[in-house]
Amino acid sequence: MSTLAEIRVLLGEPRFNWSDPEPWEELRREFGMEFPSDFREVMDAYGSIQINDQLYLEHPAGHLQHNLGETIRGDLKMWQEEDMAEFLPSPAGANPGELMPTASAVTGEWVFLRVPEAPSSPWRIVVQELDSPESTLYEMTFSEWLLAYLKGEDVTVCSRNFAPEHPFYESLS
């Protein structure tokens, strides 16, 4: 079973089902990097959502109120400021080894995609907790990390506190 299929089983059927690649192309042109295919696949399926009243995920479609491109621009600006940059294990940005902010949680965590050092290297996840100078690197892809989150595994943003029966989502659009 694919990771997206497992996510669907836990989270429920997606209702967004986006097929136009143009918003992703716009992000690629602006930031000079292509987002990982598993991240795009999940976001194209679900769109901009909040999971378990906690985790915010956004799609780059321009018509959405919660738009990934706009959020990334603001988040990069914040994380590149001197007083915030010191909290990250690597600089925020789109270059190899840098951290691209892609999600946040109401509990003060930020989820970053770590841009691979080399084209053949895998994407990884870094979670930064704002209430401490600690960050955690997860040696997994975005969809693997999201699946672990939905299963209630300890990936810093723990769904057990917000979804005791089963994971759920609501659209932000």
Image (cartoon, rainbow, N blue to C red):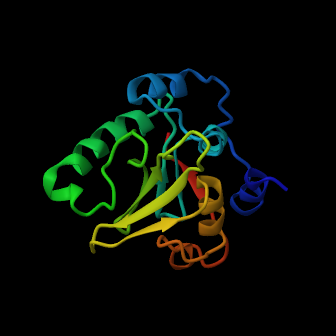
Res 108 → quadrant: bottom left
The residue sitting at 53% across, 28% down in the picture is 24
Residue 152 on image: x %, y % = 61, 75
Q: Is residue 62 visible?
A: no
- Residue lying at the far right of the rendered structure: 1
Q: Position of residue 136 (x, y in %)?
A: 43, 69
Q: Which residue is at the front of the view, 170 or 132?
A: 132
**Which image quadrant is residue 142 in?**
bottom right
Percent across and percent down for residue 26 are 47, 22
Residue lying at 54% horizontally and 38% vertically, measured from the top left: 35
User: Where is residue 122 shown, x and y percent of the image?
Assistant: 60, 50
Q: Residue at x 59, y 57 (%)?
A: 169
Q: Is 127 displayed left or right of 4 in the figure?
A: left
Which corner quadrant holds the N terminus? Answer: bottom right
Q: Residue 5 vs residue 47: left or right?
A: right
Residue 173 in view in this figure: yes
Occupied quadrant, residue 16: top right
Tell whether 31 sits left or right of 173: left
Q: Residue at x 63, y 68 (%)?
A: 148
Tally the numbered discs. 0
